[in-house]
Image (spheres, rainbow, N blue to C red):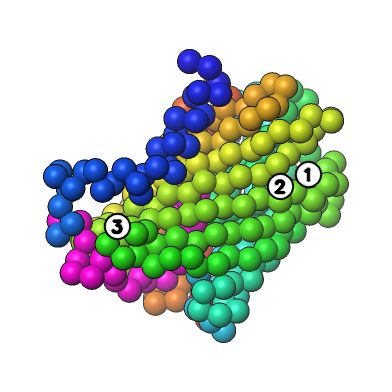
């Protein structure tokens, strides 16, 4: 199987999930999946809780602060630490939020596992083997697109730019993310996303893709666990990047407006990091 075909398979799974669900009505009846209206009020959700961002936006005139630390065990180059992954989200209206991110990374490669579209996609080469340090700021918008209505998913769109303010890179990059999902009748959440960016390295221009899907399952009043797949792929690069990850996690809603959580993950192929961990919190006020 070619690398091009390899990354297109999970992309198709994510993008076609909504259209293919209706064909499964004989197996999954609507009454078994959704409540009467197919709608339910969600508790506070951070974007950092998983690689797949939330489909919700911060309510109008409210602010959410998210922060985390990621550790990435790289297979060849020195390990990477990424912090504080500080994301400030402010609700401009009930359907539109402004976003600002500041982050610092140190290690042999950039962190490609940061959740919630907090950073640009990392497609750096891993042959230098030397420690690099980079500080960057990101800024953008997140807009709610649709609300769940039976088979129509809840969805949102994120557009974000990232500008390095220290380190070897100088160019501003742009990343867009479409996320959609459903709340099932048993309160499980199934969200998926596709992230796209356009990259360049030493005159080599290429597309960057990151599909993901996550299933979040409550198991106590304020706790839930999740299982997630995400991939990171390049298209049109001289030496293509293909990375696959599997990632479980757990989070707790300590109060109505305070969430803490941890997730870990493992690379599923040779180009991926061997292991990563991410721990952080979100506070809404």
Whether label 1 touches label 2, CB < 8 Å: yes
Instruction: Determine which residue is flagged by label 2.
Output: 105
Label 2: few (<14), some (14–19) or many (≥20) C-alpha neighbours in 10 Å: many
The reply to whether residue 145 is visible in this rendering is yes
Question: Which circle, 3 or 1, is nearer the viewer?
Answer: 3
Q: Is residue 157 above or below residue 126?
A: below
Instruction: Determine which residue is flagged by label 1.
Output: 133
Whether label 3 touches label 2, CB < 8 Å: no
Q: Observer-nearest residue: 214 or 93?
A: 93
171 left or right of 256? right
Q: Position of residue 148 (x, y in %)?
A: 34, 65
Q: Position of residue 252 (x, y in %)?
A: 37, 63
Q: Secondary structure at mark 2?
A: strand
Question: Which circle, 3 or 2, is nearer the viewer?
Answer: 3
Whether label 3 touches label 1, CB < 8 Å: no
The reply to whether residue 107 is visible in this rendering is no
């Amino acid at each position: 199987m070619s690398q091009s075909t390899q990354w297109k398979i999970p992309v198709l799974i994510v993008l076609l999930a909504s259209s293919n669900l209706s064909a499964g009505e004989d197996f999954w009846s609507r009454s078994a999946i959704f409540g009467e209206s197919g709608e339910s009020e969600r508790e506070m959700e951070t974007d950092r809780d998983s690689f797949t961002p939330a489909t919700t936006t911060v309510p109008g005139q409210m602010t959410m602060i998210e922060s985390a630390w990621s550790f990435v065990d790289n297979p060849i180059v020195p390990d990477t630490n990424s912090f504080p992954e500080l994301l400030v989200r402010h609700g401009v209206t009930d359907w539109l939020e402004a976003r600002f991110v500041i982050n610092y990374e140190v290690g042999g490669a950039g962190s490609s596992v940061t959740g919630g579209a907090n950073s640009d996609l990392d497609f750096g080469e891993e042959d230098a083997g030397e420690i690099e340090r980079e500080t960057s700021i990101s800024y953008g918008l997140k807009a709610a697109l649709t609300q769940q209505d039976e088979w129509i998913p809840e969805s949102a769109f994120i557009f974000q730019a990232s500008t390095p303010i220290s380190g070897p890179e100088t160019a501003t990059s742009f990343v867009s993310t479409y996320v959609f999902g459903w709340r099932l009748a048993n309160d499980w959440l199934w969200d998926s996303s596709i992230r796209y960016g356009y990259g360049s390295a030493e005159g080599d221009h290429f597309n960057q893709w990151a599909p993901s899907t996550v299933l979040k399952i409550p198991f106590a009043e304020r706790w839930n666990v999740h299982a997630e797949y995400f991939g990171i792929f390049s298209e049109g690069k001289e030496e293509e990047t293909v990375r696959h990850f599997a990632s479980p996690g757990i989070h707790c809603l300590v109060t109505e407006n305070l969430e803490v959580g941890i997730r870990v993950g493992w690379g599923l192929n040779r180009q991926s990091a061997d292991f990563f961990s991410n721990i952080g919190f979100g506070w809404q006020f």
